[in-house]
Image (cartoon, rainbow, N blue to C red):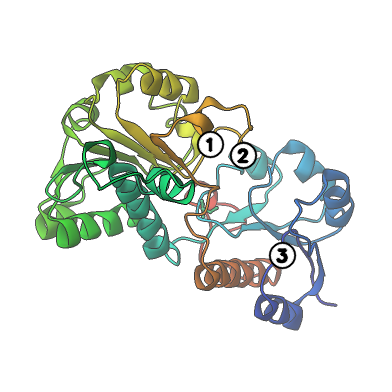
């Protein structure tokens, strides 16, 4: 008998075909998020689940009594309650590597859009408010030869360093749990303390994963350290920032602007003041959202799933759960 799996999000056809060769598959095929009662009914007897951005907590795990593995189609896994997964002896995987260039492109897009006011000026032209020339009211800030500070230098951060150095001659600072000698040597990136990075950078880019240590790591004190001309870019998770402190910093002119792909609450509440600030660029969490990259992510998640339900060790178990089921 084939193992039973549930796919709780729409995935491309080749991914369904691949999983179906090895497993009995049921799936949620709507772009609407799956309602919790439907999800809980579907997972009651499955061996594995493929999903993203759904909380894997005590109530999920106690509902799915046969569950062996949960496969995120995302690199972030802040939806995993690691202690609960250990308790229920359930493996968790993610999709590192396949999205690095795509996310780095988007984050660089946020840097350029913020500095050169691309979204704001696009609206100005379309609203028929381009009255004359391109003088002072339309000026932005340079990106080239400025200082980029990256907080969290993982794989995506490294791709950003390459773009910043090779494409825009930027001076690159980084802050990370561990030093990256190869990146330092190859791109002349400088490791700094967090406070030094915040006070020296023209663009502060937050790329750290969300976990108990990084939750709200950027708040009032950190915004206060930034230059009033600096831009804050978040390509990680909304939870890494104290969003009210960000709103205050923008309203008080402590920083020049922000480029945000992520928010504390997603989808973002329509009353959020960030949506009404012309110097804030807002995107709907699309860092990895290209057709090719989402296919690659779903396929990698599928490979993890098939291995996990057929008794093999999947290649992308999250580090905190590597000891499970060995
Ligand atoms: C990720 O992979 O974590 C991206 O944020 C998309 O969810």
User: Which of pointers 2 and 3 lies earlier in the amino acid sequence?
Assistant: 3
Residue contact between numbered discs 1 and 3, judged by CB atoms under 8 Å: no
Image quarter where the N terminus lies is: bottom right
Q: Which mark is residue 266?
A: 2
Residue at the far front in the pictured view: 131
Q: Residue 301 in the image: x percent, y percent? A: 60, 66
Under circle 3, the secondary element is loop
User: Which residue is pictured at 41% across the width and 57% down the height?
Assistant: 103
User: Which residue is pictured at 40% across the width and 56% down the height?
Assistant: 106
Q: Residue 200 in the image: x percent, y percent? A: 16, 31
Q: Nearer the viewer, residue 87 or 159?
A: 159
Q: Which of 253 and 294 is in front in this view?
A: 253
Please, is residue 249 above or below residue 148 in the view? Answer: above
Q: Which of 112 and 164 is in front in this view?
A: 112
According to the picture, the residue beneath numbered tag 3 turns out to be 10
Residue 141's image quarter?
A: top left
Image quarter where the C terminus lies is: bottom right
Mark 2–mark 1 Cα distance, whole angstroms, equals 6 Å
Residue 120's image quarter?
A: top left
Q: Nearer the viewer, residue 84 or 7?
A: 7
Drawn side of residue 227 relative to residue 251, left or right: left
According to the picture, the residue beneath numbered tag 1 turns out to be 263
């Amino acid at each position: 008998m084939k193992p039973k799996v549930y796919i709780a999000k729409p995935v491309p056809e080749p991914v369904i075909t691949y999983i179906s060769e090895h497993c009995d598959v049921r799936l949620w095929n709507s772009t609407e998020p799956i309602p919790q009662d439907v999800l809980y009914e579907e997972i009651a007897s499955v061996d594995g689940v493929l999903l993203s951005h759904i909380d894997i907590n005590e109530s999920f795990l106690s509902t799915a009594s046969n569950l062996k593995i949960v496969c995120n189609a995302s690199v972030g896994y802040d939806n995993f309650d690691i202690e609960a997964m250990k308790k229920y002896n359930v493996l968790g995987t993610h999709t590192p590597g396949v999205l690095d260039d795509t996310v780095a492109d988007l984050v660089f897009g946020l840097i350029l859009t913020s500095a050169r006011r691309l979204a704001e000026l696009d609206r100005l032209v379309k609203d028929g408010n381009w009255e004359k020339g391109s003088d002072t009211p339309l000026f932005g800030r340079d990106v080239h030869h400025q200082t980029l500070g990256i907080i969290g230098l993982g794989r995506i951060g490294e791709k950003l360093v390459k773009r910043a150095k090779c494409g825009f001659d930027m001076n690159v600072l980084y802050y990370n749990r561990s030093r990256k000698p190869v990146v330092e040597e190859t791109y002349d990136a400088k490791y700094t303390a967090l406070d030094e990075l915040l006070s020296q950078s023209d663009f502060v880019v937050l790329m750290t994963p969300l976990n108990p240590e990084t939750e709200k790591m950027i708040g009032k004190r950190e915004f206060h350290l930034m230059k009033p001309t600096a831009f804050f870019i978040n390509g990680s998770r909304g939870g890494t920032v104290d969003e009210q402190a960000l709103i205050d910093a923008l309203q008080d002119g402590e920083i020049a602007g922000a480029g945000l792909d992520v928010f504390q609450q997603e989808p973002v509440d329509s009353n959020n003041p960030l949506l009404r600030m012309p110097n804030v660029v807002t995107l709907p969490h699309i860092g990895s959202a290209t057709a090719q990259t989402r296919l690659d992510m779903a396929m990698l998640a599928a490979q993890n799933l098939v291995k996990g339900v057929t008794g093999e060790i999947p290649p992308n178990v999250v580090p905190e759960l590597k000891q499970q089921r060995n």
